[in-house]
Image (spheres, rainbow, N blue to C red):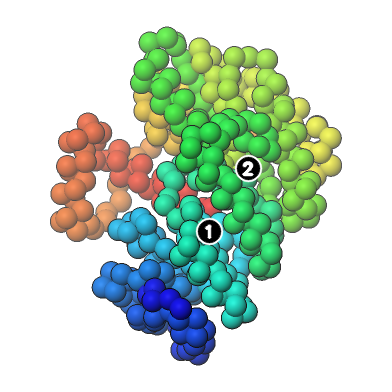
Amino acid sequence: MSNEKILLADDAPFMRMMQKDIFEKHGYVICGEAADGLEAVEKFKKLQPDVLVLDIVMPNMDGIEVLKHIKKDYPEAKIVMCSAMCQEDFVVTALKWGACDFLSKPFQADALADTVRAVLDGRTGKFAKMLPENIVNDWCIEHRNYKQDEKISQEQIDKILESYAQFYSLASAGNYSSRDKLTNCLRGHVFKNDFLKMLVEDGEKYSDITLVMLDLDNFMCVNTDFGHKTGDDVLKEIADILTGIEAEHQTYRYSGDCFALLFPNYEKEQVFLIMEEARKKIANAPECSRTSTTISAGIATYPDDGERDVELIRKADGAMYRAKQAGRNKIALAKEEKLVTKTAHYTVEQLKRLEKLSDGTGISEAALMREALDELLKKYDE
């Protein structure tokens, strides 16, 4: 028998009743129940349960947002997701934000009790403490094995859990590879570190540093029409062409089907010609040709197009966006950005904090706001 306290958060009264009955039969104490997300956050803070069993679909605040809120203030919190929303994206996102385990509805009574017992005993969910987001994103990039809207089984969920546990163990010990397993390109967080170091510490070594942001055109259709195995083959084929470019450079898998390339001491026009050749090779490569896969890319250069990493990434991204708008399968150069005035309203507290951040970083408030808007657009584009 156990006296550990469990908080239940689910918008369905019958589900909370069923869970309560299961846990009480196993000797647990149900310290509280919540019918919506906001209530779950408030009761967690007040009751400090040993485990929170949390649904995803709830009013006022969904379970993923509840998870984020709680883990921000209580990094060691033990949270088990229990939901019918069993698409891979939900499972991966839950793990990314520090969930200990994920149980699919409908579930067996023993499975629910055993899952919570394992979390309490430390036999699972040892990765509950979150890793830095940029490192976890590297794992997320590699785990898109199922169709986006496909509900996966508990067995498939358990495989994802096992994969993350292995990744977490290596990453937390600092022993995991800096290279992406599928493409053998350097990982996204390595790109950010390398680019910043080149600009800040090694800037005087280079007359130019040219950045290429490259995205596959309509890659989702490849996975949908030909399957994920073919999608992986396409990514590997493109990565081989990019890494094989005969010019000093580094190739990074920046996100799922987006690559970044850095060319030290190459001017923008030189890199444009290099990337034009790569674009043609990619379009005619066996797997890319068979699946009609092409690329669009944008190019920006330090110091002509900017001196900060976020500014150069934004300009290269903007050029890539123009290449796609122009019909895809194109390379575009960064150009001077036109600024447009747009009225908005902010709280006094937000503006005070923005001013303080600007003073502390030496970056103008306008530049910080543009950077924040880039992140917002990127978030909802995904």
State the residue at coordinates (37%, 48%): 373
- Residue 322 at x, y percent in the picture: 55, 39
Q: Nearer the viewer, residue 184 or 288?
A: 184
User: Can the viewer see residue 318?
Assistant: no
Determine the CA span between mark 1 and mark 2.
35 Å
| Type of the residue with mark 1 | Arg
**Element under disc 1:** loop
- Residue 382 at x, y percent in the picture: 53, 53
State the residue at coordinates (62%, 36%): 180
Q: Please determine whether, in this image, residue 211 is positioned above or below residue 40.
A: above
N-term-proximal mark, 1 vs 2: 1
Q: Residues within 10 Å of mark 1 (few under 14, many from 20)?
A: few
Q: Please determine whether, in this image, residue 221 is positioned above or below residue 265.
A: below
Q: Is residue 232 left or right of residue 65?
A: right
State the residue at coordinates (48%, 52%): 127
Which labelled disc corresponds to residue 198?
Answer: none
Q: Please determine whether, in this image, residue 334 is positioned above or below residue 94.
A: above
Q: Is residue 218 left or right of residue 15?
A: right
User: Can the viewer see residue 118?
Assistant: yes
- Residue 347 at x, y percent in the picture: 19, 58
- Residue 147 at x, y percent in the picture: 69, 60
Residue labelled with disc 2: 257
| Type of the residue with mark 2 | Asp
Please tell me whether mark 1 or mark 2 is closer to you in this view: 1
Q: Is residue 115 left or right of residue 133?
A: right
Q: Residues within 10 Å of mark 2 (few under 14, many from 20)?
A: some
Residue labelled with disc 1: 123
**Element under disc 2:** loop
Label 2 near label 1: C-beta < 8 Å? no
